[in-house]
Amino acid sequence: MDIVTTSGTHATPAPTLLTNRENHPNGTVVNVNGVEIGGPEVVVMAGPCAVENREQILETAVAVQADGARILRAGAYKPRTTPYSFRGLREEGLELLAWVRNETGLPVVTEVMDTRQVEQVGELADMLQIGSRNMHNYSLLDEVGLSKKPVLLKRGMSATIHEFVLSAEYILKQGNEQVVLCERGIRTFENSTRNTLDLSAVPMLKKLTHLPVVVDPSHGTGHWWMVPAMSRAAVAVGADGLLVEVHCTPEDALSDGSQSLRPEHFHLMMSEARSVASAVGREVASMSPQPD
Ligand code: PEP
Ligand code: MN
């Protein structure tokens, strides 16, 4: 499918996109500090929506690591719909992430919201997350494209697949090919779920591009009890990874508690994901390596 269109009367031939699967028919493997996304393993990235305090981030990191999460997710800078909600611990959150990364050995993915934060976040994070709201922020895409860090690019909540791919193209065009695409649900007329998780995006993105594709069933549904079922489905349709929110006491979470799994539910979700992975010729780690 040709995804670059020409407009007006002075049509120019569409260039072959850098993201085009033809460039790497076997797919790109993104290396996040030793963890390979896009290889045989379905990589689980798990953790709280936001870093809240030292005990919370350590307890959650230890719990998800014990069940096979390979990368810790948690926001220090949080994009919130209302400016009166908790917007993250910011610099203090980054420091806590650096500390917990050292304690557990888990690589960290965290959101960067602004071009001015790329250098600071890049110093500690193993992977830079571009949130749904910033998928169209082309200055930010240019900036992470210039960094050497792997990027987790989330689909804009109203973005078409073509717009999503072209946002990834911005990053590759600046020289950074280490990009993982994340389907996190889109806005539709349906409001029983927070978003409509578009699992058909997975095979489509893998056909169009050579980039790994992961699925976020937490933001994709907004309901913790739906996360295991949608995780199984995501693995079945070929996702290269999952991004899952976990909180030890979701009722006290400062953000996204209703879609966060307790560790015991995460444990069950992981064993189910493992069964589906083996049915489709892939694997999910059972326990992440820990530092000596
Ligand atoms: C998140 O991962 O916590 C997040 C804010 O996600 P999204 O950008 O997909 O809403
Ligand atoms: Mn969240």
Image: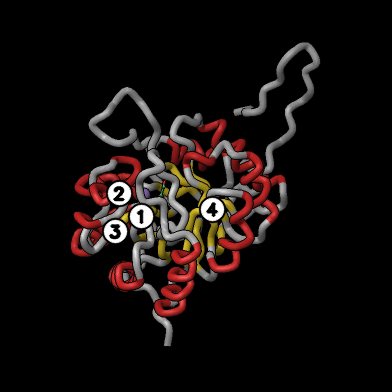
Residue 48, by quadrant, is bottom left
In front here: 26 or 154? 154
Query: CB under 8 Å between callouts 4 and 1?
Result: no
Q: Which residue is mark 4?
A: 112
- Name the residue rendered at 61%, 36% in the picture: 166
- Name the residue rendered at 58%, 51% in the picture: 179
- Three-letter amino acid code at the position of disc 2: Asp
In front here: 230 or 94? 94
- Three-letter amino acid code at the position of disc 3: Val
Q: Residues within 10 Å of mark 4 (few under 14, many from 20)?
A: many
For the residues labelled 4 and 2, the Cα–Cα distance comes to 18 Å
Task: Answer yes or no: disc 2 within 8 Å of ligand 2.
Answer: yes
Q: Which residue is mark 2?
A: 256
For the residues labelled 2 and 3, the Cα–Cα distance comes to 10 Å
- Three-letter amino acid code at the position of disc 4: Val
Element under disc 2: loop
The first of marks 4 and 2 along the sequence is: 4
The first of marks 3 and 1 along the sequence is: 1
The first of marks 1 and 2 along the sequence is: 1
Query: CB under 8 Å between callouts 3 and 1?
Result: no
Element under disc 4: loop
Q: Which residue is mark 1?
A: 49
Element under disc 1: loop
- Three-letter amino acid code at the position of disc 1: Cys
Query: CB under 8 Å between callouts 1 and 2?
Result: yes
Q: Which residue is mark 3?
A: 246
The first of marks 4 and 1 along the sequence is: 1
The first of marks 2 and 3 along the sequence is: 3
Nearest-to-viewer mark from 3 and 4: 4
Query: CB under 8 Å between callouts 2 and 3?
Result: no
